[in-house]
């Protein structure tokens, strides 16, 4: 059973914007911390941003001031608003759910973001 479904990836020119979405089941959304990761070609997976169940957010230094994580509790959906995109933001982006009250560790299927110069 698919628990996390991402959408919103695509191709954009540098300086542009994209919004990623991650739809989760209510059980996951209400009990888990949610995180966006990314993996660029030839690189290791990188934590991009996290939001905890109490709304605390953290960001990787590489995206601070450009990316914003948010969630819509009514829609059980996590978002990643990406502005001022750079070519180095090109990667497959994954949402993940985990935490002490989370019923398990969950990963989405990933969505490709390609930023061209």
Image (cartoon, helix red, strand yellow):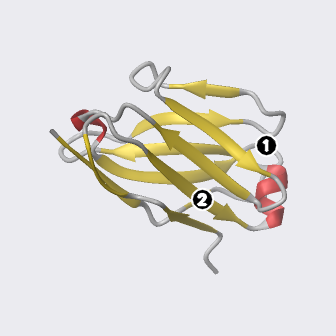
Q: Secondary structure at mark 2?
A: strand
50 relative to 67 in the view: left or right: right
Residue drawn where x is 48% and y is 35% of the image: 48
Q: Secondary structure at mark 1?
A: loop
Residue drawn where x is 58% and y is 52% of the image: 96
Within 10 Å of disc 2 (Cα), the crowding (few <14, some 14-19, many 20+) is: many
Q: Nearer the viewer, mark 1 or mark 2?
A: 2
Pinpoint residue 86: horizontal percent, then vertical percent: 28, 33
Pinpoint residue 30: horizontal percent, then vertical percent: 84, 53
Q: Is residue 94 above or below residue 61?
A: below
**Where on the picture, by quarter, is residue 50?**
top right
Residue 22 shows which numbered tag?
Answer: 2
34 relative to 101 in the view: left or right: left
Q: Residue furthest bottom?
A: 1
Quadrant of image for the C terminus = top left
Query: Where is mark 1, residue-wise?
Result: 100
Quadrant of image for the N terminus = bottom right
Pinpoint residue 13: horizontal percent, then vertical percent: 24, 44
Residue drawn where x is 31% and y is 38% of the image: 89
Residue 58 shows which numbered tag?
Answer: none
Choose the circle earlier in sequence order: 1 or 2: 2
**Where on the picture, by quarter, is residue 15?**
top left
Q: Are marks 1 and 2 in contact (CB under 8 Å)?
A: no
Distance from label 1 to label 2 (Cα)? 20 Å
Q: Is residue 95 above or below residue 56?
A: below
105 relative to 14 in the view: left or right: right
Pinpoint residue 85: horizontal percent, then vertical percent: 34, 35
């Amino acid at each position: 059973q698919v628990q996390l479904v991402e959408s919103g990836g695509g191709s954009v020119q540098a300086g542009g914007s994209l919004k990623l979405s991650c739809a989760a089941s209510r059980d996951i959304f209400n009990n888990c911390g949610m995180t966006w990761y990314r993996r660029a070609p030839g690189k290791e997976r990188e934590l991009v941003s996290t939001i905890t169940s109490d709304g605390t957010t953290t960001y990787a230094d590489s995206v601070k001031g450009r990316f914003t994580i948010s969630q819509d509790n009514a829609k059980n959906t996590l978002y990643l608003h990406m502005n001022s995109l750079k070519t180095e933001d090109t990667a497959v982006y994954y949402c993940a759910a985990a935490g002490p009250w989370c019923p398990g560790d969950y990963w989405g299927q990933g969505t490709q973001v390609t930023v061209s110069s």
